[in-house]
Image: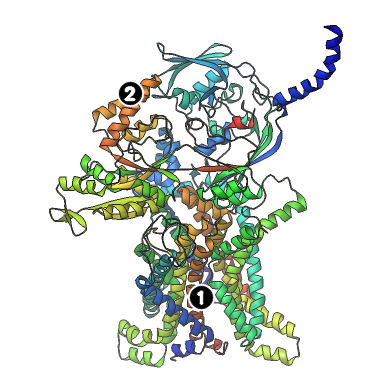
């Protein structure tokens, strides 16, 4: 053993070292540090990135999310721990228990603890936050700190999307700063941006629409490898040029330049469908009050062609069940109303209409409908008008002010209108836009079974059972058709691959379809 | 003094060019259905195409033929332009002449209102109103007319005042003629040339305004408008479509305004005779 | 008659503006509070806040009382609260104002000076080829709307040639200071100012040229020539100076035009001034901002015109009446 092995050792050493180097080529500690990363945005200003100061839209929340964190978070596959290491749902008590990390510090050095979580919940209950509601069905009845790093939240009612909409969205604020602040809007200085997140705010300019973030050295997951993040304002049309020129690292791009961007060496990613445009039908007015009539309309509109023409192919045809085909909640058996003008004719004739010259008439009167929409839908409206008229239904298409459209729809003073909304990742939106009040809902409550299902899915905590309910909802909704989903647009982002940007599963926080997850910058 | 407007324009080089351009635009507007090769509203999947034999100026983002939309756009611009021109010149004449004829408190009140409106920037008022009520073409014509008659009124009044003292008018008055009769028979005919100049400049301003408002996106988008076309083209400026979508539209718009400018300028010596001889063709 | 009458004019104009601001939201269908505060109000307002605002604006009272409440809030200097920007309107507008002043100021100065010089030279050579081609050229230029000029310049020099930046007033977070910063700002300012200046050049030019032509026929010019004064002295000191007068008075009206021209140019170049703010507010239907800008611009234009009217007699002692 001795002399021979000793002689072999040096000979073995070199291949061993080479072998080792080949096995472990990339040390995790060797992730190249990036000193600055610039993100382009066409709006620019989304408000001061503090929970009560940012504009109540997705991009506003995102800018705040680099500084403030939530109990749980999501990556590309689903929920991951954030401020809470573990969590469980106690069904009998309708409560969530969160076990918190003990190594988190606020940007000013203070330690984070369960006290902050309990405080945040109480504070937000008393001072509504535009993104999270803690009273009502999504509410928390009581929050208790069981020990320094464990909290128990008793929910008001069983609320299926709690983890996503509340635990994964509510930014935790420091008790030692916000305690005693009666008017949350009055806190506007540096203390309003003390959070636990990987970045601190170095600068914000309202009129230039710019933000500058610096990495937080003592972040509990390790200092972010991107030292500085900048948000700059560049108009939509100019973002592709800026990306190509290299002055910007990431930004949203119009679909036409996708291949151009890829040729320039950039990575292009697309969001799973998040938004839909609908044809709202006044189901309280003749003849739209007849289900058959509404279905006839659906057969007359070729949604595939609509996407090809008005979205230049960048989108997916709408599913009459509202839930997009790319979603986990999609029911593949939802009736689709394939474009078929013959069916339209059949249905209308069944309702007593006759085709005279090119239009349908009944009792001597020509069938004419009024379609109203906001100006941004002018192409879509024009398309629908064309399609319906080809099918024999006369359409008077008008665009008007958004407020006017909303007011008319609210007052049931319309025939057809076009409306769009997002938040399609979480089925909780279904109840809001089908049964809810206000012009952004179809206010359709005539089908008891549907209403009952919509109510039930909100409190069904078992995922499988909930899915079943959502499947049934799609079938009934598509059958009754109080509104017809027209299309889902596709959105694209391009970036230089220095940071791995990704689309968070089911949208960031409560469903924001923007690939700016702070996790990309950490690691 | 009767100044021959036709002579003024004919003798001016730019004036002739202006007339030609205007007549061309009017012809295009009138002949739009013949000149267009497609229905300007017909959408298709053939979007953002470069110019070809089928589509002389290519297609826009929803596959509509740009050339067809260009010629129909002329209708909108000229309709609004002439509509506002006629209405505002009419209002300006009515108020201006009546103020001069009736004098007294009426004149003071009218002229104060006139001055007040002249001072306020018209564009801003129209934008403000349009933010609340999206105007249709008709409403737009009405709105623009109501805000642009004041300039003409002032000129008409000044002119009417000086005409009032002329011999034939004084004679008519001494015969006991009514205000209206005097105005109609003696003053208005002599206002002819000035009316025309005011009209031309009103048209020009209206064409400009309609395009600008359409560009901002606050006019009726279901109507084909050059300003709206330019707005749509701008949002695709990262592609090279601007060459055949933006530029021809902008040039058409500019030519129309230039034509009106030239004609108006050539006719100006009518108001200010000392300028005559300034351009010898 | 002069000053008194004119004050009345401006008061009427001011009242009209206020009336417009007051009546428009109340003429819209639906809840006037939503019309006053815009879309965001729906999302952001609590019931308590709504009640407070209804009380403050007396929205449940007859129109006359509402008018009174409106005036009261206005004179308290409160231009309203923008729910989109989550801030009171006045600071938002004031924050953007410097850039617009820079843009409008530079263009106004440049176009006026250039216009006057060109007008004098052209009028001096009236009838000549130079004059005729300048006239035709500038009148043609005048036909180009400012937004079209802006777009052409942007596409030619910004997108295609890449000489000038594509948007904004300066390069954000560039870390530049002093001279480098100034140059950066000037680079961003160049194209927008060029567009705005070119678009409004003709106004000053035509007016100066016309006045120059009339002035040149005046007897005193003959005297000056007889005195043997140099060309330049004749042109600028005598004829020019008197030709400038109408331009000065017209400046008041032009400011209105250039400010609205700035709206379009800022939009094309995404220049962060009040014009761009207005456009963004239009898109978002942020009515408090739209009204706030409207009020400020209208009042500023009125004030400037008023001041010019006051100073006119001082500039030209011959004139004691408004044209």
Disc sitting over residue B258 in the figure: 1
Q: Considering depth in this image, is B172 or C232 the residue closer to the camera?
A: C232
Q: Residue furthest left?
A: A363
- x and y percentages locating residue C84 in the rendered image: 49, 43
Q: Looking at the image, can residue C211 be seen? A: no
User: Does B138 appear above or below C74?
Assistant: below
**Chain of the residue where label 2 is placed in the rendered structure:** A
Query: At numbered mark 1, what does the secondary structure look like: helix, strand or loop?
Result: helix
The C terminus of chain A - image quarter = top right
Which residue is at 47% across, 58% downward?
Answer: B48
Residue at the spot of label 2: A456
- Figure coloring: rainbow
Query: At numbered mark 2, what does the secondary structure look like: helix, strand or loop?
Result: helix
Quarter of the figure with residue C127: bottom right
Spatial CA distance of label 2 from label 1 is: 67 Å
User: Does B61 appear above or below A501?
Assistant: below
- x and y percentages locating residue B199 in the rendered image: 42, 77
- x and y percentages locating residue A496 in the rendered image: 63, 42
* Lateral position of residue A520 relative to residue B255, left or right: right
The mark closer to the camera, 2 or 1, is 2
**Chain of the residue where label 1 is placed in the rendered structure:** B
Q: Considering depth in this image, is A384 or B1 the residue closer to the camera?
A: A384
Which residue is at 13% across, 56% downward?
Answer: A364
- Callout 1: few (<14), some (14-19), or many (20+) C-alpha neighbours within 10 Å? many
The N terminus of chain A - image quarter = top right
């Amino acid at each position: 053993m001795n002399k021979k092995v000793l002689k072999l050792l040096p000979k073995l050493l070199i291949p061993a070292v080479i072998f080792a180097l080949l096995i472990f080529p990339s040390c995790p500690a060797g992730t190249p540090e990036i000193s600055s990363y610039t993100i382009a945005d066409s709006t620019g200003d989304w408000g001061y990135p503090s929970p009560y100061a940012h504009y109540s839209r997705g991009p506003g929340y995102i800018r705040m999310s680099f500084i403030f964190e939530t109990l749980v978070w999501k990556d590309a596959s689903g929920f991951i721990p954030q401020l809470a290491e573990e969590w469980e749902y106690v069904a009998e008590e309708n409560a969530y228990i969160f076990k918190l990390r003990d190594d988190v510090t606020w940007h000013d050095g203070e330690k984070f603890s369960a006290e902050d979580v309990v405080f945040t919940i109480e504070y937000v209950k008393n001072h509504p936050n535009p993104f999270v509601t803690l009273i009502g069905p999504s509410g928390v009845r009581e929050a208790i700190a069981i020990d320094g790093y464990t909290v128990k939240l008793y929910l008001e009612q069983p609320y299926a999307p709690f983890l996503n909409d509340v635990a994964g969205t509510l930014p935790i604020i420091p008790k030692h700063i916000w305690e005693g602040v009666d008017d949350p809007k009055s806190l506007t200085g540096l203390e309003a941006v003390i959070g636990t997140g990987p970045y601190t705010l170095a600068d914000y300019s309202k009129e230039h629409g710019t933000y500058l973030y610096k990495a937080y050295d003592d972040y509990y997951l390790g200092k972010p490898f991107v030292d500085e993040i900048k948000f700059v304002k560049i108009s939509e049309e100019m973002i592709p040029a800026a990306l190509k020129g290299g002055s910007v690292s990431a930004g949203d791009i119009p679909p036409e330049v996708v291949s151009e961007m890829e040729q320039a060496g950039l990575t292009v990613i697309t969001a799973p469908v998040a938004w839909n445009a609908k044809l709202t039908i006044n189901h309280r007015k003749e003849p739209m009050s007849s289900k058959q009539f509404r279905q006839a309309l659906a057969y007359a509109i070729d949604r595939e062609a609509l996407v090809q023409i008005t979205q230049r192919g960048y989108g997916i045809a709408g599913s009459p069940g509202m839930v997009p085909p790319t979603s986990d909640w999609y029911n593949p058996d939802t009736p689709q109303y394939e474009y078929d003008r013959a069916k339209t004719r059949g249905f209308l004739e069944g309702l007593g209409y006759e085709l005279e010259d090119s239009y349908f008439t009944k009792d001597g009167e020509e069938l004419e409908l009024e379609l109203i929409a906001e100006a941004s839908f002018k192409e879509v409206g024009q398309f629908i008008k064309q399609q319906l008229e080809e099918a024999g239904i006369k359409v008077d298409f008008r665009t008007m002010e958004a407020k006017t459209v909303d007011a008319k729809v609210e007052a049931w003073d319309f025939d057809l209108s076009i409306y769009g909304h997002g938040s399609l990742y979480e089925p909780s939106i279904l109840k809001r836009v089908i049964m809810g009040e206000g012009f952004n809902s179809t206010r359709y409550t005539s089908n008891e079974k549907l209403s009952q299902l919509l109510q039930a899915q909100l409190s069904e905590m078992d995922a499988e059972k909930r899915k079943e309910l959502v499947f049934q909802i799609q079938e009934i909704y598509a059958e009754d058709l109080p509104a017809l989903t027209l299309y889902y647009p596709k959105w694209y982002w391009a970036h230089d691959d220095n940071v791995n940007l990704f689309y968070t599963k089911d949208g960031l926080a409560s469903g924001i379809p923007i690939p700016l997850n702070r996790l990309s910058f950490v690691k | 003094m009767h100044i021959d407007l036709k002579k003024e324009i004919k003798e001016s080089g730019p004036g002739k060019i202006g007339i030609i351009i205007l007549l061309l635009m009017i012809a295009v507007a009138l002949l739009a259905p013949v000149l267009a090769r497609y229905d300007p509203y017909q959408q298709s999947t053939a979007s953002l195409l470069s110019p070809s034999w089928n589509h002389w100026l290519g297609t826009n983002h929803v596959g509509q033929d740009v050339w067809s939309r260009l010629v129909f756009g002329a209708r909108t611009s000229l309709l609004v332009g002439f509509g506002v021109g006629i209405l505002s010149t009419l209002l300006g004449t009515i108020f201006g002449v009546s103020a001069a004829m009736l004098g007294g408190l009426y004149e003071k009140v009218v002229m104060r209102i006139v001055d007040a409106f002249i001072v306020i920037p018209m564009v801003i008022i129209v934008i403000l109103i349009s933010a609340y009520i999206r105007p249709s073409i008709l409403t737009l014509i009405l709105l623009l007319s109501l805000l642009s008659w004041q300039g003409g009124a002032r000129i008409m009044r000044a002119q009417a005042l000086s005409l009032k003292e002329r011999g034939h008018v004084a004679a008519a008055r001494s015969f006991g003629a009514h205000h209206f009769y005097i105005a109609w028979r003696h003053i208005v005919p002599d206002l002819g040339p000035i009316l025309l100049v005011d009209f031309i400049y009103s048209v020009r301003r209206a064409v400009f305004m309609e395009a600008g408002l359409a560009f901002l996106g606050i006019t009726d988008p279901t109507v084909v408008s050059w300003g709206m076309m330019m707005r749509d083209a701008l949002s695709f400026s990262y592609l090279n479509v601007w060459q055949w979508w933006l530029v021809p539209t902008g040039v058409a718009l500019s030519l129309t305004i230039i034509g009106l400018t030239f004609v108006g300028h050539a006719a100006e010596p009518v108001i200010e005779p000392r300028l005559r001889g300034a351009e010898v063709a | 008659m002069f000053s008194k009458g004119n004050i009345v004019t401006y008061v009427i104009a001011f009242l009209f503006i206020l009336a417009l601001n007051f009546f428009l939201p109340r003429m819209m269908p639906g809840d006037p509070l939503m019309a006053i505060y815009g879309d965001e109000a729906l999302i952001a307002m609590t019931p308590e806040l709504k009640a407070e605002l209804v009380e403050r604006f007396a929205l449940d009272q007859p129109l006359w009382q509402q008018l009174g409440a409106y005036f009261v809030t206005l004179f308290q200097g409160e231009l309203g609260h923008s729910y989109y920007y989550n801030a009171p309107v006045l600071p938002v507008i004031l924050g953007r104002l410097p850039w617009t002043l820079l843009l409008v100021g530079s263009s106004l100065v440049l176009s006026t000076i250039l216009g006057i010089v060109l007008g004098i030279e052209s009028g001096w050579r009236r009838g000549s080829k130079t004059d005729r081609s300048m006239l035709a050229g500038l009148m043609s230029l005048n036909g180009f709307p400012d937004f079209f000029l802006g777009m052409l310049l942007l596409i030619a020099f910004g997108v295609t040639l890449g000489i000038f930046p594509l948007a904004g007033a300066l390069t954000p977070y560039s870390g530049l200071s002093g001279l480098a910063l100034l140059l950066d700002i000037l680079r961003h300012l160049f194209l927008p100012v060029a567009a705005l200046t070119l678009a409004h050049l003709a106004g000053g030019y035509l007016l100066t040229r016309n006045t120059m032509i009339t002035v040149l026929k005046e007897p005193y010019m003959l005297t000056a020539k007889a005195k043997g004064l140099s060309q330049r002295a004749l042109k600028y000191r005598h004829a020019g100076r008197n030709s400038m007068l109408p331009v000065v008075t017209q400046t008041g009206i032009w400011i209105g035009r250039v400010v609205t021209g700035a709206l379009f140019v800022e939009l094309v170049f995404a220049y962060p001034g009040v014009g761009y703010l207005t456009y963004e507010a239009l898109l978002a239907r942020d009515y408090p901002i739209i009204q706030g800008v409207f009020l400020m611009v209208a009042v500023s234009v009125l004030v400037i015109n008023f001041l010019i009217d006051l100073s006119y007699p001082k500039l030209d002692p011959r004139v004691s009446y408004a044209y």
